[in-house]
Image (tube, helix red, strand yellow):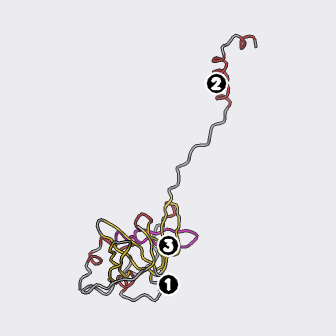
Amino acid sequence: MAAEATQSPFELLGALDQRCRSRAVGLPRLEDAREEWTGVLFRLHGVEMLAPMDEVGEIVSVTSVAPVPGVKSWVLGIANMRGNLLPVMDLQAFLFDEKPIADPASRRLLVVSYEGVVAGLVIDAVLGMRHFWRDEIAEELPSLDERIRPFITYSFSRLGEHYPVFSPFRLAESEGFMDVAV
């Protein structure tokens, strides 16, 4: 005790710090952080799929569309979205050559902008956002119609359910999607 009394306050704090560090229990090691993925769950042609949030600019209700002559049947026309012209494409008609049977009130536009291609994709319904961990990516793709497979990048699996991930960017890159004239 007498030795401690002759120490300066700075030396006392240093000794206290050293004693605390020698007796402290270390923090647990930081495990590799799990990376989260977020997407929009939507329905098209009776199939629930996800679109990556970073590939969807926005989701809007289907507004009035002005028809455009000389285009394929799946090109519904042009819509005015806050002063900007937006080509509107019926995704089900493009992929499956079928007119949608979904309730018109539930139909939505996924607005996509990719390397100069801007389009509104009409889908049957938006079911909300879904969050997954990257380690939930499935080893195999679920069985899907061959017409949609080129646009599916991977799928997530959770509790026995498979959620294919549809890439609007892959769609925008496809020659068939860019060929709208009849």
Residue type at mark 3: give it: Leu
Mark 1 surroundings: few (<14), some (14-19) or many (≥20) residues within 10 A: few
Q: Residue at the spot x=31%, y=87% of the render? A: 73
Identify the element where label 3 is drawn.
strand
The range drawn in magenta is 152-170
Q: Which mark is residue 144?
A: none
Q: Is residue 168 magenta?
A: yes
- Residue ID for mark 2: 18
Asked if marks 2 and 3 touch (Cβ < 8 Å), the reply is: no
- Residue ID for mark 1: 105
The label nearer to you, 1 versus 3, is 1
* 3D distance between C-alphas at marks 1 and 2: 69 Å
The answer to which of 63 and 133 lies nearer the viewer is 63
Q: Position of residue 23 (x, y in %)?
A: 68, 30
* 3D distance between C-alphas at marks 1 and 3: 17 Å
Image quarter (top left, top right, bottom left or bottom right) of the N terminus: top right
Overall secondary structure of the magenta stretch? strand
Residue type at mark 2: give it: Gln
Identify the element where label 2 is drawn.
helix
* N-terminal-most mark, 1 or 3: 3
Mark 3 surroundings: few (<14), some (14-19) or many (≥20) residues within 10 A: many
Q: Residue at the spot x=64%, y=24% of the render? A: 18
The label nearer to you, 2 versus 3, is 3
* 3D distance between C-alphas at marks 2 and 3: 55 Å
- Asked if 182 appears above or below 38 in the picture, the reply is below
Asked if marks 1 and 2 touch (Cβ < 8 Å), the reply is: no
- Asked if 21 appears above or below 172 in the picture, the reply is above
Q: Is residue 164 magenta?
A: yes
- Residue ID for mark 3: 41
Q: Position of residue 155 (x, y in %)?
A: 46, 69
The answer to which of 122 and 92 lies nearer the viewer is 122
Identify the element where label 1 is drawn.
loop
